Amino acid sequence: MDVTVNRFLKILLALLFFAALIWITVKLSNIITIFIIGALLAYILDPITSFLEYKGMTRMQATSVVFLLLALVLFLFIYFVVPLIVDQVKVIQHTFSSGQGTEAIQRMEQSLKESIPMLKNVDLDITTKLHEAINHFSNSIFSLVGSLISLITTLVVIPFVVFFLLKDGRNIKKGMVSIIPNRYFEMTLNLLYKTDQQIGGYLRGQFFDAAIIGFLSVIALWILHVPYFLLIGVFAGLANMVPFVGPLTGAIVAILVVFVTNGTVNQMIMVAAAFAIIQLLDNVVVQPLVVAGSVQMHPLIVLFAVIIGGQFWGVLGMFLAVPAAAVLKVLLVELYNLYRTINLSQQ
Amino acid sequence: MKEDSLWTNIFRKQSNEKVDTLVVLKKIPLFRDLSRKELRQLERILHQRTYKQNEVIFNEGQPGVGMYIIDSGEVHITIGPEQKVLAVLTKGDFFGEMALLLEAPRTASAIASKPSKLYGFFQPDLFSILETFPRTGNKILLRLSQMIAERLRHSNLENQELRKKLDSLTKKEQ
């Protein structure tokens, strides 16, 4: 009887603990997101720091050099690129509020209804939906940059997190491993290493891949005289980090913008072709070089992971879905192997 | 007791001096070629673990990822369910270094027969040192290869001796 009560109490305590954990995670989700972004950046920059360390610098010096370079890149980005992007967003907002865009959308709605009989009697109301979406998007950008708290967290907390994780990450990891009981210590170390192998290359690869794709898209759209080329190019690069959905979204947005701004069919085809060529280059040259298949998972699992990630954490969730699924895969495979070896040695 | 050549520290040196970690590390054949600076780089990577008396360090059959160096205490290397002792290792000795190269199940168990302080050096640490400090990593790797070759030579000699004994026994029987 006592045993049953004890067990019940234990389960109850465990449930309460998990409920509290979930509650805290939800309450602190903003800070957790900032921490995740910081940790991600530190993780991506770690090989560069290690390389400088290998060249003879101390960890502190190497971290400082990387940090200064990062600050320079960030400064150049904020100084030159961000004002252009903000201007382009403002122009889009203005276009819509002045009614120029609305006319084009209505034209598109009409032609869609004519070409697809199924949609004849359906009120698509694309104008309102798009208007809302653009307003929401630009508002969220302005609120992110505008609100003081976001500004402080973005400009101060993230660099702090990146700096200290980059400098002390190894010691933090070692300290965390040191509190693991002897029994699970070797297994944990092995799991950490395998996970790092699986996701490290993937995350770093995706980051550089996004930069390359973004750059190529900006150049292609600029050559094709697509309005807001910088905004769409940056968006296409960022979107590319999300498997499957990302590359397609970038292309669709670019084609839509050409259509809305009274572009010719020829121009639309050219934009589509440009994105197709960029994707081809990405799949044939860039991806094999930088991402190098570090995460070996079935495309279907990747797709599901992306959808689930998007449901819970939005865009960040979609981006983190693949590495998270990879971690889960490593954990399951290793635990299964451990279970099998223990079972075999007992037989 | 005849000690097993694979597990016994055949590189053991008899000396009682020391105190600090660097001295313990310098005595390990694997790290013998390292300078003081390189040893300090290594020390930052090593994992320090403490074990109670009779606590299992690893079990036979478990996947192994690295080696342990004894800083203080005593470790028994045992085999089989009856826990037959293959070797008794003390301060400055090390075990499990094969797992640094080969991720295979442990061929024996290690149990702390006295309260012990060990340093763990694992495959991921070796790879990390090879990437960050390749000169240090290469020195360790070269030593490791020499040690494994030496163990192989040792086992080979034992093997030859046993074969001779077996031959003489079969001749006697005939």
Image: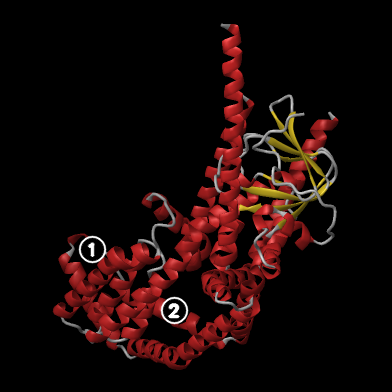
Q: In this rendering, would A51 be left or right of A24?
A: left
Res A137 label: 2
Three-letter code, disc 2: Phe
What scheme was used to colour the molecule?
secondary structure
Tell me if I can see residue A24 in this picture.
no
Q: Which residue appears at 43% of the width and 92% of the height?
A: A80
Q: In this rendering, would A16 be left or right of B105?
A: right
Image quarter of residue A135: bottom left
Residue B72 x %, y %: 82, 50
Tell me if I can see residue B4 in this picture.
yes
Q: Which residue appears at 27% of the width and 86% of the height?
A: A222
Quarter containing the C terminus of chain A: top right
Image vertical order of residue B99 relative to residue A25, above or below: above
Image quarter of residue B167: top right
Mark 1 to mark 2 CA distance (whole Å): 27 Å
Image quarter of residue A172: bottom right
Instruction: Work out whether mark 1 precedes mark 2 in sequence or the reverse, and give the earlier one.
Output: 1
Q: Which residue appears at 50% of the width and 59% of the height?
A: A199
A39, B6: nearer the viewer: B6
Chain containing mark 1: A
Q: Which residue appears at 45% of the width and 55% of the height?
A: A305
Three-letter code, disc 1: Leu
Residue B59 x %, y %: 68, 36
Res A335 label: none
Res A119 label: 1
Chain containing mark 2: A
Residue A325 x %, y %: 49, 53
Image vertical order of residue A235 relative to residue A81, above or below: above
Categorize mark 1 by other alpha carbons within 10 Å: few (<14), some (14-19), many (20+). Answer: some
A302, A46: nearer the viewer: A46
Image vertical order of residue A21 relative to residue A32, above or below: above
Residue A22 x %, y %: 66, 57
